[in-house]
Amino acid sequence: DAKTTQPNSMESNEEEPVHLPCNHSTISGTDYIHWYRQLPSQGPEYVIHGLTSNVNNRMASLAIAEDRKSSTLILHRATLRDAAVYYCILCPSGTYKYIFGTGTRLKVLA
Amino acid sequence: NAGVTQTPKFQVLKTGQSMTLQCAQDMNHEYMSWYRQDPGMGLRLIHYSVGAGITDQGEVPNGYNVSRSTTEDFPLRLLSAAPSQTSVYFCASISLGGSTDTQYFGPGTRLTVL
């Protein structure tokens, strides 16, 4: 199964954009890229997902490299409530068998 | 909708004891799954089900049993608890073929095996 690699931790100032990188060099052609985040003592919650094209929603944007070996989650204006562990997850098409990495712990500074 | 609910929130077991972690969802989702999360780690898939009467193994199924008699419920059974099963357990569900790929996770059950 393809794996993801993320930095262990990142910091951002409040109200500034945050770019969270993810490497997935062994991704297969049909793997979707999902991002979830986990707030303290809670279950993961969906942020965004995509296959090949960049995606935007009300929470974030997802930029996918042309070769699909990496992606970046973009939070346009970080708030204190965005402090969480962010997981980049690969999901084979037709399944929901998520392969979690260890995630990036985002700290947002006031 | 209550979403995905899990009981209990906390549980302490002694080695060798058995117990069932409960998971229920009220969204009529076909797909349900169980994950475990060890300290400082990401989640790992234990078992999953694509509908009533259908279950399959995930990445770390040993020591756990599941069954799916209804769409709503997906209990996870520990037959003989071991300290290595100390973890936080999350249940999740998603609608197959739905308009969204959002998987909904429950709040988790924190299990300690002494």
Image (tube, grey):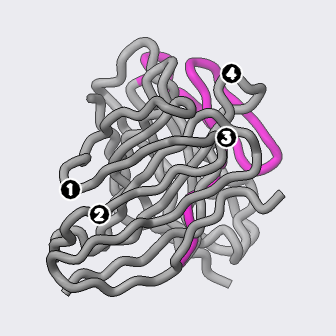
Residue type, label 3: Thr
Amino acid type of the residue tagged 4 in the rendering: Gly
Callouts 3 and 2 close, C-beta under 8 Å = no
Instruction: Please name the residue that numbered disc 2 is placed on.
Output: B78
Q: Give the chain of mark 4.
A: B
Q: Which residues are magenta?
A: A41-68
Of marks 4 and 2, the one in the foreground = 2
Secondary element under disc 1, as helix, strand or loop, is: loop
| Residue drawn at (54%, 77%) of the image | A40
Q: Earlier in the sequence, mark 1 or mark 3?
A: 1
In front: B35, or A31? B35
Which of discs 3 and 4 lies nearer the camera? The answer is: 4
- Are the two marked residues, 3 and 4, in contact with CB atoms closer than 8 angstroms? no
**First in sequence: mark 3 vs mark 2:** 2
Q: What kind of residue is marked 2?
A: Leu
Q: Which residue is mark 1?
A: B63
In the image, taking residue B100 as reference, residue B109 lies left or right, namely: left
- Cα gap from disc 4 to disc 1, whole angstroms: 31 Å
Q: Which mark is residue B97?
A: 4
- Which mark is in front, 1 or 3? 1
Callout 3 and callout 4 share a chain: yes
| Tag 2 subunit | B
Furthest-front residue in view?
B69
Circle count: 4
Tell me if label 2 and label 1 are in contact, CB under 8 Å. Answer: yes
- For label 4, the SS is loop
Q: Earlier in the sequence, mark 2 or mark 1?
A: 1
